[in-house]
């Protein structure tokens, strides 16, 4: 008798979820709207602006060690750097112009102690080439090619 009641409750719950449209996998994904574009994205987080949705990795470091990736959002026309397998104290930079790391042309982030990954704020990539670099605590520098 208990198994019949459980089965009826489970079926009723599934029916309610289906009718409400909240069954995982059946609901259509909500459209993603980017909250910035080009130079308007400079210094902003790709996650908080929606630029990380449908972004792609356009360049990767080729050296053995931490993986440095240049990420690009065509919706936002912006790029940022993501690193994996790094060490706390390593520094990553997203750049779109040469020279010193200055506001709007370069954003840096230090990998937090106890962590192995991080990502930078975005740089404008609308009609400008961008690239990413990792500066290891030991002084070694690894960069991606420009995109």
Image (tube, rainbow, N blue to C red):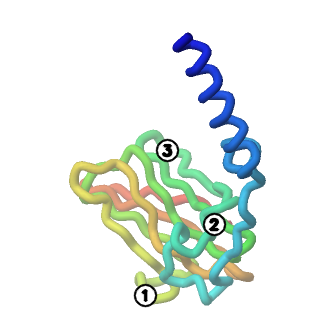
In-image side of 116 versus 31 (left or right): left
Q: Earlier in the sequence, mark 2 or mark 3?
A: 3
Placement of the C terminus among the 4 image quadrants: bottom right
Count of residue discs: 3
Tell me if residue 33 comes above or below residue 24 in the rendering. Answer: below
Which secondary structure lies at badge 1?
loop
Badge 3 crowding class, 10 Å Cα cut-off, few under 14, some 14 to 19, many 20 or more, is: few
The tag on residue 63 is 3
Q: Position of residue 141 (x, y in %)?
A: 39, 59
Residue at which label 2 appears: 146
Nearest the camera: 32 or 42?
32
Point out the tag, 1 or 3, that comes first from the N-terminus: 3
Q: Which residue is mark 1?
A: 102
What is the C-alpha distance between the residues marked 2 and 3?
Answer: 16 Å
Which x, y percent locates residue 115?
29, 50
Q: Residue 71 shows which numbered tag?
A: none
Dot 2, crowdedness within 10 Å: few (<14), some or many (≥20)?
Answer: some
Q: Is residue 75 visible?
A: yes
Q: Secondary structure at mark 3?
A: loop
């Amino acid at each position: 008798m208990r198994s019949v009641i459980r089965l009826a409750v489970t079926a009723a719950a599934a029916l309610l979820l289906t009718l409400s449209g909240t069954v995982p996998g059946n609901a259509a994904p909500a459209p993603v709207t980017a909250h910035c574009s080009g130079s308007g994205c400079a210094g902003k987080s790709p996650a908080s602006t929606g630029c990380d949705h449908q972004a792609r990795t356009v360049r990767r470091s080729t050296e053995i060690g931490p993986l440095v990736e240049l990420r690009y959002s065509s919706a936002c026309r912006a790029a940022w750097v993501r690193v994996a397998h790094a060490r706390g104290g390593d520094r990553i930079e997203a750049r779109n112009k040469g020279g010193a790391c200055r506001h709007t042309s370069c954003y840096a982030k230090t990998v937090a102690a106890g962590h192995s990954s991080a990502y930078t704020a975005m740089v404008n990539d609308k009609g400008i080439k961008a690239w990413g670099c990792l500066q290891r605590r030991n002084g070694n520098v690894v960069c991606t090619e420009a995109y």
